[in-house]
Image (cartoon, rainbow, N blue to C red):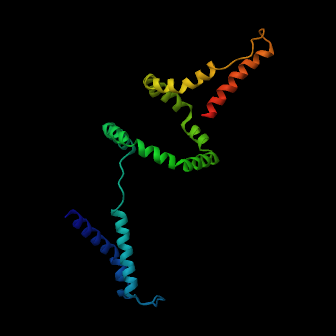
Amino acid sequence: MRTFARLSLLVLVGLLAAGPALALPSASVSRPTLSGPTSPASFGLRLVGSLAGSLAVFGAIRIKDTGSLAKKFVQRASAAAGDYKDGVTQAGADWEANARAGADNFANGVQQAIADKRFEKGIAEAGAAKFTMRASTLGAQRYPTGVGAAEGDWAKGTQPYLQTLSSLTLPPRRPKGDPGNFARSNAVAVALRAQKVGR
């Protein structure tokens, strides 16, 4: 019923707006004009134009203020934590398959971002103040939890490097300041680099 009432109102307003234009051909004018007689087609076009104008007025999009929308975003997202967990629990296989399939898109996107200098632009837009504020508040709160959750991953990622170091046979140690000692640190650097890029 509300839709019918709104439609009726729009038609009425459109007809009222078109009234003066529709009355022009019937008005008696004493001086000659160069325009031809009004055709049914031009009458229809004027009517459609008037209705479109009235729809543009009454069909305008009403948007809430940004502050209210931001609060709503946080409230809805917080309430959806359970849905988020359920969704990602079931999505592992799809994520892996889609991520693998999107490798070329990722590479192309990174190259385009480099060409557009988006990295530098993002840093400039955020600025030092935002970095400091986020790192000192959210970062400080989440750091211990993140480290605790990463214990197993840290051990898994570090173990191969520890094995590489334990298997090295370094050149003999030379007196302090002897350039020969650089060979020892160089052997470590080369081995660790090979471990990193070779996996």
The residue under the point 21% across, 62% down is 2
- Viewport quadrant of the C terminus: top right
Residue for point 36% across, 63% down: 57
Residue 17 in the image: above or below residue 168? below
Q: Is 95 left or right of 13, judged from the image as shown?
A: right
Q: Toward the viewer: 92 or 62?
A: 92
Front in this rendered view, residue 103 or 199: 199
Horizontal and vertical percent for residue 56? 37, 65
Look at the image and tell me in which quarter the N terminus lies: bottom left
Q: Where is residue 108 in the image (x, y as percent from the top left)?
A: 59, 50
Q: State the image coordinates of residue 53 (x, y, percent, origin top left).
A: 38, 69
Question: How many marks do you count on the picture?
Answer: 0
The residue most toward the right is: 179
Picture quadrant of residue 145: top left
In the image, is residue 7 above or below residue 184? below
Residue 62: image quadrant is bottom left
Residue located 50% across and 27% down the image: 135
List x then y, in percent, for residue 83: 31, 40
The one nearer the camera, 161 or 80, is 161
**198 on left or right of 73:** right
- Is 159 on the left-hand or right-hand side of 74? right
Q: Residue at x 39, y 88 (%)?
A: 39
Please tell me whether residue 72 is drawn above or below residue 2 in the rendered image.
above
